[in-house]
Amino acid sequence: MPVTMDDVKKLRAMTGAGIADVKKTLDETDGNIEKAAALLRERGIAKAAKKADREATEGFIGSYIHHNGKIATLIELNCETDFVARNEKFQELAKNIAIHIAMANPQYKSREEVPEEMVNAEKAVLAKQATEEGKPANVVDKIVEGRLGKFYSEIVLLEQSYIKDDKMTIEQLVKEAIATMGENIQIGSFSRIAIGQ
């Protein structure tokens, strides 16, 4: 099926990828826009992994105050250049993550930040639950590791399901932005203030 300029425009709008990449991917997928978008996303995430070591010393502070004035958040979103820091899509990403933090209330940015004693206490609770459910002792550790993922997804920002699209995590959201903007993007510090908490 021949690729039209309308297809190219539509896929560019969906993914933010360059014209050459869009045309090439549409040719590879015989003009199937959904398959091409998925392929571009996969390739972008692979490119994002390569950019992760680059220094991100520029950025933007995203903020959000809930309509009732009872919850507010701030987030430091870092990138490599001032050019990207001033980009509307980058600033919108910071704002969206700030909104997510207000709603999902993460306690830590990554697994590495969760205190070891907190993880050990959770493991003990999960092991006790698995034992009480009658699970054999030789599989309790595997069950604990599996359930620990849910624990992290509740308190760790990067592992939480994004509130605007629960099919992706915040980490995947950032990786997609890296693929689109072509720079290393990292979440720095964040804070959440809520009345009465």
Image: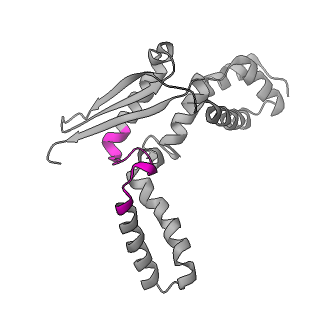
Indicate left or right for 65 with 88 as reference: left
- Residue at the right extreme of this rendering: 1
Eyeballing the image, is 184 above or below 39? above
Eyeballing the image, is 152 above or below 129? above
Q: Position of residue 18 (x, y in %)?
A: 68, 19
- Whether residue 113 is visible to the viewer of this picture, yes or no, is yes
Seen at 51% across and 29% down, the residue is 185
Indicate left or right for 183 with 77 as reference: right
- Whether residue 14 is visible to the viewer of this picture, yes or no, is no
- Which is more toward the observer, 58 or 197? 58
Q: Residue 190, located in which quarter of the rendered image?
A: top left
Seen at 72% across and 36% down, the residue is 39
- Which is more toward the observer, 132 or 57? 57
Seen at 41% across and 78% down, the residue is 129
Q: Quadrant of the N terminus?
A: top right
Q: Position of residue 122 (x, y in %)?
A: 38, 67
Q: Is residue 58 magenta?
A: no
Q: Residue 60, located in which quarter of the rendered image?
A: top left
Which stretch did the figure color magenta? 100-117
Q: Is residue 111 magenta?
A: yes
Q: Position of residue 78 (x, y in %)?
A: 44, 26
Q: Position of residue 46 (x, y in %)?
A: 67, 36
Indicate left or right for 39 with 165 as reference: right
- Which is more toward the observer, 27 or 59? 59
Eyeballing the image, is 158 above or below 50? below
Eyeballing the image, is 37 above or below 146? above
